[in-house]
Amino acid sequence: MTLSKRANLFALLGILFLALNLRGPFTSLAPVLGQVMEGLSLSASAAGFLTALPLLSFAIFSPMAASLSRRLGLYPSLSLALFLIAGGIILRSIGVEVLLYVGTVLIGAGIATGNVLLPVVVKIAFPARISIVTSLYIFTMGIGSTLSSSIMVPLSSLNVTQFSGWQLALLFNIVFPIAALVIWLPKVLKDKRSASAGIKDSPPTSMKTLLTCPIAWQVTLGIGLNSFTFYAFAGWLPKMLSDLNFSEVDAGYIYGFLQFSTMIPGLLLLPILSKSNNQRAIITVCAGSVFVALLGLIALPDFAIFWVGLFGLANCSTFIIALSFVGLRTTNPGQAAALSGLSQSIGYALAATGPTLIGYLYTATAGWTVPLLLIAIVAAFCVMFCNLAARDNKVLQGR
């Protein structure tokens, strides 16, 4: 194996192991949330705030990631993100209510930093394969999420020393940041030059500058509106299905099918993106299918499993392609970091409003037609902005 191929392999492994940490520690709480509520005597409102806290953390900390990487360097910043995730996992597992919240915030800060900076690593390490590598790491995020979520309940039945079941289960997530640090830390310590390269060597770009750039807003709204549709829909799907006369068991299976369907696009898109440069057509079809799935669920709810599967496939496909625009629509790592921070900060801020707004509309209308129509309208706007973002233009072009 040549030196360049070996370097590319280690870069890809670093990207994929980091990606394992960017969803699992967040989603693994849900399967044992009831046990956490019982163990710490949390009210329903406190538990609701706990589940929303990661999204709020993503929105708050995402804008800080670019400046952090410029100050510390790209690779040290990503190593810091992994330490934050690891520290948050430990604090969250101790079994003290205040540390549960503090740990969740640290996990959110670490994931936000990783989410913003990982597209920058892809742009630097694989500039000619941005879409393909993005698909791979989104698929790996799904693997981490599925693995950690599926093992939570079995682990929670165990008791080891002072740890109750749910504490041990949540602590299991520490495996992922440790595994990633095994790859990242030697790279940072061995080659300080490459560790500080990338964003530091790029012309500085602030998110404030991008606010005047149409392409930056098109990418940002494409990602943000797509995130809104997912969290607004997924957050209420079990309740929706229950009101549509599906049994609790069937609703659980269909919800699990939604999570599974979001893993598949990472593989399905690989051969398509490697052979086609027409991202505008692909993302229009994917984003448009989200709109179709929502209308289909309104019109033909008996076929919910089909519409839910279509929604998951289309929504995640849209996210993968839209996220690749962070690298494709920028000319240097500094711009990519700024655009990634802008798009994910606004994107998660929009996503955090989704479940609450949909819950309010459901209460006000006593049904799911209006809430689903609102999500469909947002999906239609997502089609428009994704289509505009898919044009081969660069941010700050001509400036």
Image: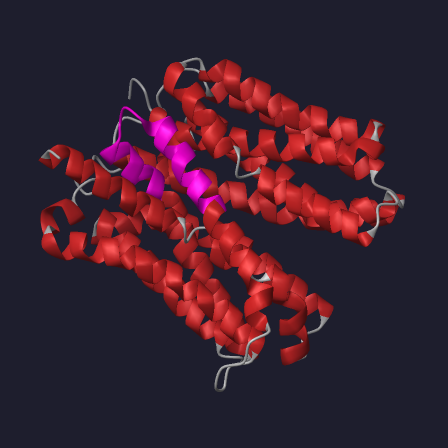
Colour scheme employed for the rendering of this structure: secondary structure
Is there any visible trace of residue 169 in the rendered image? yes
Residue 251 is left or right of residue 243, and the answer is: left
Residue at horizontal 40%, vertical 65%?
A: 174
Looking at the rendering, in which quadrant would you find the C terminus? top left
Residue 220 is left or right of residue 253, and the answer is: left
Q: In front: 150, or 43?
A: 150
Residue at horizontal 42%, vertical 49%?
A: 62
Looking at the rendering, in which quadrant would you find the N terminus? top left
Q: In front: 155, or 167?
A: 155
Asked which quadrant contains residue 315, the reply is top right
Number of labels in the image equals 0
User: Where residue 386 sits: x, y (%)?
Assistant: 52, 23
Residue 83 is left or right of residue 239, and the answer is: left
Q: In front: 64, or 358?
A: 358
Q: Main secondary structure of the magenta part?
A: helix
Is 261 drawn above or below residue 106 in the view shown?
above
Q: Is residue 217 magenta?
A: no
Residue at horizontal 60%, vertical 49%?
A: 352
User: Where residue 303 sits: x, y (%)?
Assistant: 80, 31
Residues shaded magenta? 117-142
Is 360 drawn above or below residue 326 in the view shown?
below
Q: In front: 90, or 60?
A: 90
Q: Residue furthest bottom?
A: 162
Asked which quadrant contains residue 30, the reply is bottom right
User: Where residue 118 sits: x, y (%)?
Assistant: 34, 43
Is there any visible trace of residue 23 in the rendered image? no
User: Where residue 292 sits: x, y (%)?
Assistant: 71, 24
